[in-house]
Amino acid sequence: MSVELWDILDSHGNRTGKTAVRGTGVLKPGEYHLVVHIWIISFDGRILIQRRSTERKLMPGEWAATSGAVIAGESSFKAAQRELAEELGIKAEADNLFKLLRLKRKNSFLDVWLTFSDVKAEDLKLQKSEVDTVKWVKTDELVSMIENGEFHNYGEHYFDSVFEKIDDIRGTVI
């Protein structure tokens, strides 16, 4: 298993020139790393969600967004492309990968991305060490899953912001 390095960011999201080894807990107060979430939306408005592998240390077995840490030297865009390809086998080009927003969290910045796809769930190539299964859901089903604890709750502000931005982009693309 190779060592994964993260760029350390300052409180404004700028690279500091320093790196941290993933999983070592070396981020100090005022230091951040970059994470991406990618939402996959079908052209009829359904959302592709994934259940994380039960072998994962963080959020094992939980339904969640496709996500991952940005590795040192990598852009947020390239990380979103990489995570989609690695975890689901989806190739997203620049004309179909839209940055929705950036949120500042406790010790990370979170860039949220959106891509459109009508791929069938059974045609995806799941990275079994990361993803147990996937399914397409309608927005109201996802909201219900969040409310009853079946889907990871990233927070009300997160979902309000993401759903609003998805609606904005859907209106301009579809």
Image (cartoon, rainbow, N blue to C red):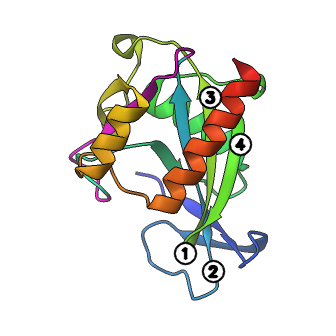
| Residue under label 4 | 99
From the viewer's perspective, is 19 left or right of 172? left
Compared to 68, does 43 lie above or below?
Answer: above
**Amino acid type at mark 1:** Asn
Residue at 73%, 49% in the rendered image: 75
Sequence-earlier tag: 1 or 4 = 4
Main secondary-structure element of the magenta-colored stretch: loop
Q: Nearer the viewer, mark 1 or mark 4?
A: 4
Q: Measured from the top left, where is residue 17 in percent x and y? A: 77, 73
From the viewer's perspective, is 72 left or right of 140? right
| Residue under label 2 | 31
Q: CA gap, disc 2 to disc 1? A: 7 Å
On whether residue 45 falls in the magenta region, the answer is: yes
Q: Measured from the top left, where is residue 59 in percent x and y? A: 29, 55
**Amino acid type at mark 4:** Lys
> Do labels 1 and 4 touch, CB within 8 Å?
no
Question: What label sits on residue 115 in the rendered view?
Answer: 3
Q: Measured from the top left, where is residue 28 in percent x and y? A: 56, 87
Compared to 69, does 26 lie above or below?
Answer: below
Sequence-earlier tag: 2 or 4 = 2
Sequence-earlier tag: 2 or 1 = 2
User: Residue 103 or 124: which is nearer the viewer?
Assistant: 103
Q: Residue furthest bottom?
A: 29
| SS at mark 3 in the image | strand
Residue at 28%, 42% in the rendered image: 145
Residue 168 in which image quadrant: top right
